[in-house]
Image: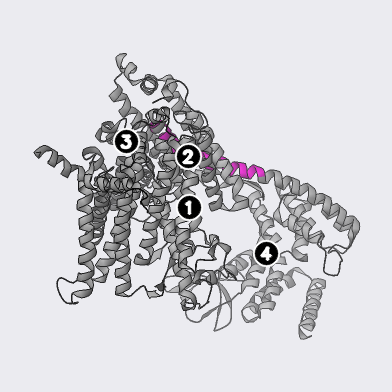
Amino acid sequence: MSFNTLAEQSRLIQAIRDDRGGQVFLLILLAVGIVVPILNLAVADGSVMHLSGYTVTLLGKYLCYALLAVAVDLVWGYCGILSLGHAAFFALGGYAMGMYLMRQIGSRGVYGDPVLPDFMVFLNWKELPWFWYGFNMFWFAMLMMLIVPAVLAWLFGWFAFRSRVTGVYLSIITQALTYALMLAFFRNDMGFGGNNGFTDFKDLLGFDLHHATTRMVLFLCTVFMLGLAYVTCRYIVASRAGRVVQAVRDAESRARFIGYKVESYKVWLFTFSAVLASIAGALYVPQVGIINPSEFAPINSIEVVIWVAIGGRGTLYGAIVGAVLVNYAKTYFTGALPEFWLYALGALFILTTLFLPRGVVGLVTKRKDNTA
Amino acid sequence: MTKRLFLFLLLCTGLFAAITSAQADDAADYADNINRLPAASYSEKTEIVRKLALSEQSGAKAVLTAFLAGNLYSRSADSKVFIVAEVDRGYQLTDAISLQAAGSAPTDGFEKVVSNNSLRKALRNAIAQFDLNSGDVETRLAAVKEMTRSLDDDSAALLRERMTNEQSSKVRSLIATTLAIVDLDSSDAEKRLAAVDALKGNMSAEVYNRLTAMLQQGSDGNFAEPDERVRIAARNVLVGIERWRTTYGAGQTMFFGLSLGAVLVLSAIGLAITFGVMGVINMAHGELMMLGAYTTYVVQLLMPNHMGISILVAIPAAFIVSGLVGILIERGLVRFLYGRPLETLLATFGVSLLLQQVVRDLFTANNRPVVTPEWLAGSWQLNDAFAVTYNRLYVILFTALVFTALLLVLKRTTLGLNVRAVAQNRAMARAMGVRSEWVDAMTFGLGSGIAGIAGVALSQLTNVGPNLGQQYIVDSFMVVVFGGVGNLWGTLISGMSLGVINKLLEPYSGAVLAKIFVLIFLILFIQRRPRGLFPQKGRAAEG
């Protein structure tokens, strides 16, 4: 991002200054970015203070989810677009990164083909499909990771918002979108590995993915991207355009009658949000080491929405809190009480919508309001 | 060479036997044949089986049947042949020649008369020849079908003989087809021509393949069928058959489409009430269907001896179970969230997770076996290109019934009047004395109950497991949105057309792509008509 004028720069500073929760969040993120590498790499293996590689990966995963949640909060919390298909953009980003990683395996695969990924050899394919060209170059894969979801989101948004599809109708067709993509990616003929997806990655830009330092760098990239995304989103919602977007959320017809082109605001916000989700997916895949079509499942998108709802929608940092909290609880419960997890998640859905319309973050700020 | 000589000798002995045929000799031959069985080679055995079938001895069928079932043994001591039945630690013996009971014996000291695949084929064919003279039409039909599978000159001759005194027209036409197929191989062109004519309008796949094969051109440019007239006749008959096949195929696709559409309508119609009439998004709708399917399972557990009527009991039971759960959801949750559709969506999604886990805890995560009663199973096969399976047919009828009943409830009862009043204008309805809270609960209960009924139908068509609901929830939303919210007729038409479109696409694109195309079509359609096929008009649309 470049700041052309002093005014814009000062507006960003102003936005951050007004954002108490954001300041706290950015400080915590900075602390995590400093403390985690030290505890993981500098502290000796046997020490109680040592953070295992597993924990670092887990934290990295949470932060990717947090980035996805920020993307959803941006459109849902600030523009009232309840997307039940954001996991589709997340998965698309993941697939773009996955395609690059697959090409990097080269002849180290099980079948040892220098060009074709294992699953293509297995399917008896003779040459690389055209849409796999270029994915051996990192910059190209990253460009695609940004462009493909952006184009899809832009087209989808342009059609949907121009025809004034709103509310639950929009939610349902976003769900149809991710469902259709899931069915498509499950097909072997599509050339994306069918239901096995991609896995068994070796290295990224020449660095071994199983090496602790590589993983730490990936983690730090995630921390950095999350911070950058947060500041950018904060800047957007505090800008003039951001105000219009919130006006659209509160009274769409009125905003339209005043003379704003509601559709374009929505389309661009939706596209930007999709790109954020895609970046989250691209960061997620090398850390987790697998991507398959179940990432497109409608339930995943709904889960993201619930993270945002539990954290507190329309605050940005609330989405991050929700994502980390719910996923930590998920990790804990699926390990300790696997049967209990769905009960807990179900109850969380119900209780938050009934009793916590402003989420966990709302609880804290409310108490502050009372004491003040 | 030796094989030819052997066959020639066999033929000679056969001829010799025929010339000197006399009643006593027949019986002696018969006994001799049976005694030769255990030691004979497979090809000899096949020949013996053929002879046994042609001998007019009363016990032949029993011997052949026992041989096919692997119950024919020879005693090592004197190589006498017995039909055995296993009793505890021994054999109940029956003399194979006289069919007299011969006491029992321990299992050792007996050797099985073994058979192989081609021999078993010959056995089945031979047994079919006996069945050919059975008094029962169905048995005769089955026998002809069995003989068609491995047809040779002997069995063709038998069929020809049967043709002369066969009474049933069904059996006659089947035999005629079979004989015509045999005649297609005849060296006489006139016979082939007659056979082709006889096969006109026949829809069986076998006939189609044979006629197509006749018109095939070999690598040397010669047709498989040398005679031009026969080729022309065959081509004409084929064109006729193809026309019928296309017609029947279209009918079949239509039927599949309608039955799929009926399932979609059935699963969406409950949603159409809660979503359409009340404006409430119930994400737990699929799980209410799942509850209905599990109710069927439980009902069948409770009445294991009355499977036939278990489904009829399950329908009201499922309606009540799902309906009560629905009312519980409405009273406990949804009523606090009216006017906030997105929050309702999330909260009911939570309910769906809870219900899935409850079912998982109660019935385990595995699929539960639900029995299909006999009157629901089976199919009506018109010909190879068109068959109506009863469960699909019943689903269509059942959907029509449920739809009509629902329409009557909404149009003809006080409850229906109240529901429509509240849907149109809540405040005014309340002012007129309608208890809107009570109406909400009842509407939600009605929609949920119908989901339960849909679950009963689904239990007959798909696996009953905790994920049953999730498979249908996206589809049912699509149907409601496509049809237009608040319009039952719209739901009916949209469900049926989506089902038919899906099945029409399937032959060209495969099932998964067809579904993807339908979803994309829906996404685009919503852009053109954001309120569905039949949008609500007037004030109710503003809400």
Same-subunit check for callouts 2 and 3: no
Q: State the predominant SS element of the stretch in magenta.
A: helix
Q: Tag 4, which secondary structure? A: helix
Mark 4 residue type: Asn
* Tag nearer the camera, 4 or 1: 1
Q: Which residue is mark 3?
A: B326
Residue B398, percent from left and from top: 49, 36
Q: Distance of mark 1 from mark 2, alpha carbons?
A: 17 Å
Same-subunit check for callouts 2 and 4: no
Q: Is residue B263 left or right of residue A286?
A: right
Q: Which residue is mark 1?
A: A181
Q: Nearer the viewer, residue B315 or A85?
A: A85
Chain letter of mark 1 equals A
Same-subunit check for callouts 1 and 2: yes
Quarter of the figure with residue B244: top right
Q: Are marks 4 and 1 in contact (CB under 8 Å)?
A: no
Q: Is residue B417 left or right of residue B144?
A: left
N-terminal label among 4 and 3: 4
Residue B235, percent from left and from top: 83, 53
Whether B289 is among the magenta residues is no
Q: Nearer the viewer, residue B227 or B512?
A: B512
Q: Tag 2, which secondary structure? A: helix
Q: Which mark is residue A160?
A: 2
Chain letter of mark 2 equals A
Q: Tag 1, which secondary structure? A: helix
Residue B36, percent from left and from top: 65, 79
* Tag nearer the camera, 1 or 2: 2
For the record, the magenta segment spans B250-274
Mark 3 residue type: Gly
Compared to residue B263, the image places residue A334 above or below, namely below
* Tag nearer the camera, 2 or 4: 2
